[in-house]
Image: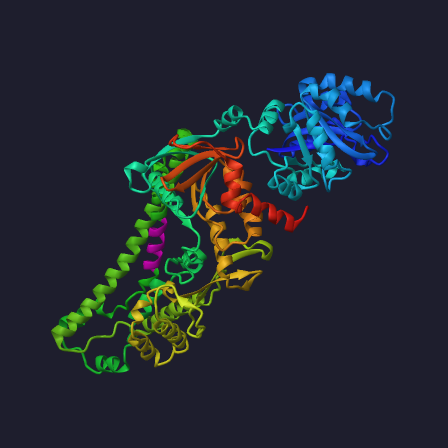
Amino acid sequence: MRIDIHTHTKKVKQGDSEHRNIDVEKFTEIIRETDVKILAITNHNHFDFEQYIEFKNNVEGICQIWAGVEFDILEEGRRAHLITIVNPKNAQAFSEKINDIIGTASADTFTISLEDVVSNFDGLDAIFIAHYHSKKPSLTDKDLAKLESLVLNPKRVLKEASNSISAGIYINHGHNSIHGSDVQNWSDYIKDSTSLPELRLPVESFEQFCLLLDKDDTTIKTILDKKTKETIQLNPFNNVAELMDIDIYNDINILFGSKGTGKTDILKALSKYYNGKGFKTEVYESNSKKIDDVFDLKGTQLTIDIEQLGIDDCSAELVSLRNATEKEITSLSKYKDYYSVDATNKISKNIKIDKFTTLDENSPKRSFEDIKNSLKKFQEFKNYYSADTKLIEIIGNDLLGDLENVIDRIIEKINSESGERFIDYKSISFFNKLVKLFVSEISKKTGQPEKPTKTGFAEYASNRIAIEKDVNRILENISKTIEPIIEEVGNLGDKGKLYCKTNLLIQNGKISDAKYKHTNSTTKIPQKSVADKIELISKHIYANTLFEKIDELKKIESSESVSSINDLLLFHKHFTLDDEFYTPSNGESSMVLLHNELMKDKEIYLIDEPEKSLGNDYISDVIVPLIKEKAKSGKRVIIATHDANIAVRTLPYNSIYREHDINGYYTYSGNPFSNSLVCSSDKKENLDWKSISMKTLEGGKSAFGERGKIYGNT
């Protein structure tokens, strides 16, 4: 929820920008594109009641519009600006007061004293926001002290900073500070609005905002109740005397306290509790994991299916290659033996079937197998849609009936064709077997040589061609390139994003790069030798030495481990920054691991001292916004920390403080809005949240103040 307490909708003074003028339609369109939920119209020495009502009504339900004016203050000859915003319920009375006070005076020349501002508008339930320090023209500390003495409630006086950084510094130094857009050009407002302050609590009215300023306990708790709270009983120290009840909100919960007060034990007990409830949680401990192991640079968990990358694993081709044998050609001597002997057996002379030539059965066999595969696919398709009840619900029975009718006719047609092709194939097969049987039996009965039924060249040539096809298919897939697998690791701040890159190659017999490891083996020797030998076989397909080379392939030690191209896969996994090889430092490893942990989509985050090895700028610029995002999403974020940026700037709904003294350990809970910490055992008085936070996280008020002096005012 963003708030803008300083906007202009009109060019009122001569020095004002023309681009401050805006109509209601454009205003509404812009506000819809932002996260601004509260906006105060504060033109210079001018309040247009009609415009205010028009703007307010047009964005009702989208953004609250508050009534205000930016006055020119004159105090002891010094000029300054003071924004005065009143309860929207008093907008009409505010307008009438403005008209009475300013009258016919020019906005360029009008000035008013602090006394007159307070006397006229404090009764309208007003808040006063003074330009301060670097926000010119500003009130002095003396002027602010005077203003606070004049108003009924000094907590209604805020200091406007020039930007979010200055506002944050003022807040850390105890100043109640805020900043607005002071819009110069409405065309830039959508972009500029992203740097506006964000209210940690959902404020639904002007009154609620004022009560938030007052840190009213009742109001704070009412707002907190809009978040889900779970009261959990823990025994983190395995001591019945130290059973504790703690509240956890679906937001940011901060555990803080001195070293040795059991914060880590509480986190582990919470993890055990949530795991027992069915959540999968673990405590993230900074520096407990190595980034190389988290991202598995050694590839121990790496599983790659090359077929999903468009590469055939060629397992069938490798089996065929290893089992390949030579097909014999019928020698001329067999023809000579047969024709040089006269047939003397009368019966054999009268048998004619042995004189027939065998027919080619490969072609009808392939034809039959093709139709059989088609039939199988159609039957599988029919089984698929028949079993899919959701599909039936979508397309309806009528359409499904039409589909089934067409599919049944197709299957019937394929079945018929399949039967005919089966008969053709088997007829030829049986005929060839019959011819061979008679030739063999006649030879046995007569003692004469068998008549050669075929030359064998077709089988010989087909065998070599089949081996060539297998080898070429294997080599074709081995030669394919694979795109690297890239995953984002995390953000290194100003350096940019760190990625983990997995380069993949297929061993072709020539790769000897030591950086590349095999995904399925600890040694490179068999895979490299096998790939090299397959390449060699391809050059001997039509040579007499072909089967010698195949035999050499089979004799390679452990060559059977290469059963598919998957077994030839190599990988090199490493980190990259700007597409260059990069090894992150220990600090950077901590950065990206924490970033990676917070980027996971989980319901519960348990984090122990995330600030370890991290720079304050990274915590402030990257980690704190990430934690806030998780809180916005309703996640339970529970962090044990000693870092003020995390413990304070995240504006936690729940702060759990652990204290230790000579009498034992104590647990307090509270939040920065009520500014109190309540002891769970009622044995101790309430503590001041700000004082305890400053003491525990900043080293105490004096140390904090000393740093402020060293840094100087910003």
Rendered image quadrant of residue 77: top right
Residue 697 in the image, given as x and y percentages of width and height: 51, 45
Q: Residue furthest front?
A: 662
Whether residue 317 can be seen here: yes
Quadrant of the snapshot with the N terminus: top right
Residue 253 in the image, given as x and y percentages of width and height: 46, 38
Q: Is residue 429 left or right of residue 714?
A: left
Which residue shows up at 73% across the image and 16% down it? Answer: 93
Q: Is residue 709 left or right of residue 25?
A: left
Nearest the viewer among 290 and 439 is: 290
Residue 302 in the image, given as x and y percentages of width and height: 39, 58
| Magenta stretch encompasses residue 366 | yes
| Magenta stretch encompasses residue 666 | no
Q: How many marks?
A: 0
Q: Main secondary structure of the magenta part?
A: helix
Q: Is residue 184 left or right of residue 376?
A: right
Whether residue 500 can be seen here: no
What span is colored magenta in the figure? 364-374
Nearest the viewer among 344 and 170 is: 170
Nearest the viewer among 265 and 697 is: 697
